[in-house]
Image (cartoon, rainbow, N blue to C red):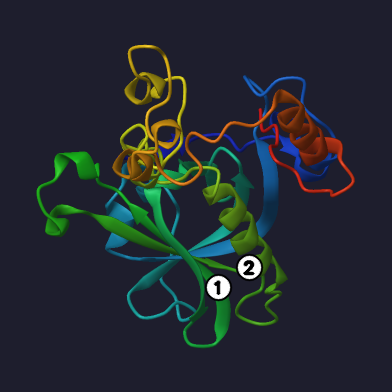
């Protein structure tokens, strides 16, 4: 699952500004521009020196190990970050223009942290392995990237770190884990009529040969219990109409159903 290399930086016109997105209803949700949640410049990335070689796109960054880096880390300076509804882009402007596009499924963790125990920073743990092709967790390759604020070594302005973190939270929610979605989409396998409700799908199970209801009508206690509470109760059409009207627009204010589509 290699990161996508970029040889040119994104442009503002490629995105829909977040404020504009929140103030209007798009004419279509297909083919529209990604929404830009955050954009900051003059950031620095801290990546382990060994980790720089784990991905071809990351290896193109111009890094330097110096006294301002934690032990074992290299610093990548003059970096812009773009957090959009589509992906996260890290782009180094100098000495050579190069960057990476990171999709949200590739970000297994993002969190705020204290770099060198004192500087507010953002940690991104990237998964560089297609987990569908591995047999054990030991085969999964990860890379930690720490995003440092401008002037982190002297007078750091850490406001951007919190805003980048918040933006990534919002965008990550737009890309849920497929496994979680599959669990949530499982259909209710309750047998028809098991809850006591009679519908068009299971009505035949509760009618006799003459089309009459079994259970309450015939006074069979055992059959009545199978139908569930309230089954077999007959209400006049006028009563049903009154209840439906009150449930939607009535004075009691209690909504019986709500349109969601």
Residue that extends furthest to the left in the rendered view of this protein: 135
Residue that extends furthest to the front in the rendered view of this protein: 219
Q: Is residue 21 visible?
A: no
**Which element type, helix, strand or loop, lies under badge 1?**
strand
- Residue wearing tag 2: 161
Image-based side of 140 in relation to 52, left or right: left
Q: Is residue 152 visible?
A: yes
State the image coordinates of residue 155 (x, y, percent, origin top left): 70, 81
State the image coordinates of residue 47 (x, y, percent, origin top left): 40, 64
CA gap, disc 2 to disc 1? 6 Å
Q: Residues within 10 Å of mark 2 (few under 14, many from 20)?
A: many
Q: Quadrant of residue 142?
A: bottom left
**Which element type, helix, strand or loop, lies under badge 2?**
helix
Q: Quadrant of residue 105?
A: top left
Please tell me which residue lies in front, 122 or 184.
184
Q: Quadrant of the N terminus?
A: top left
State the image coordinates of residue 188 (x, y, percent, origin top left): 37, 38
Q: Residues within 10 Å of mark 1 (few under 14, many from 20)?
A: many
Q: How many marks?
A: 2
- Residue wearing tag 1: 121
State the image coordinates of residue 183 (x, y, percent, origin top left): 34, 44
């Amino acid at each position: 699952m290699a990161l996508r290399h970029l040889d040119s930086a994104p442009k503002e016109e490629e995105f829909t500004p977040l404020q504009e997105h929140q103030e209007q209803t798009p004419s279509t949700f297909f083919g529209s521009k990604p929404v830009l949640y955050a954009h900051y410049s003059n950031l620095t990335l801290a990546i382990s020196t060994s980790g720089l070689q784990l991905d071809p796109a990351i290896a193109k960054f111009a890094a330097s190990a110096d006294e301002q880096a934690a032990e074992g880390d290299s610093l990548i300076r003059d970096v812009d970050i773009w957090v959009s509804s589509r992906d996260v882009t890290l782009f180094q402007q100098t000495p050579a223009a190069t960057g990476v596009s990171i999709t949200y499924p590739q970000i297994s963790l993002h969190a705020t942290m204290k770099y060198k125990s004192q500087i507010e920073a953002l940690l991104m743990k990237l998964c560089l392995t297609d987990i569908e092709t591995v047999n054990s967790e030991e085969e999964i390759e990860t890379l930690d990237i720490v995003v440092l604020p401008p002037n982190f070594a002297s007078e750091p302005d850490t406001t951007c770190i919190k805003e980048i973190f918040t933006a990534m939270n919002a965008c990550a929610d737009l890309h849920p884990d497929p496994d979680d979605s599959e669990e949530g989409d499982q259909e209710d396998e309750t047998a028809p009529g098991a809850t006591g409700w009679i519908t068009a799908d299971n009505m035949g199970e509760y009618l006799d040969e003459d089309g009459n209801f079994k259970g309450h009508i015939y006074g069979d206690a055992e059959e009545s219990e199978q139908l569930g509470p309230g089954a077999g109760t007959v209400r006049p059409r006028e009563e049903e109409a009154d209840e439906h009207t009150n449930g939607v627009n009535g004075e009691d204010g209690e909504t019986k159903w709500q349109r969601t589509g």
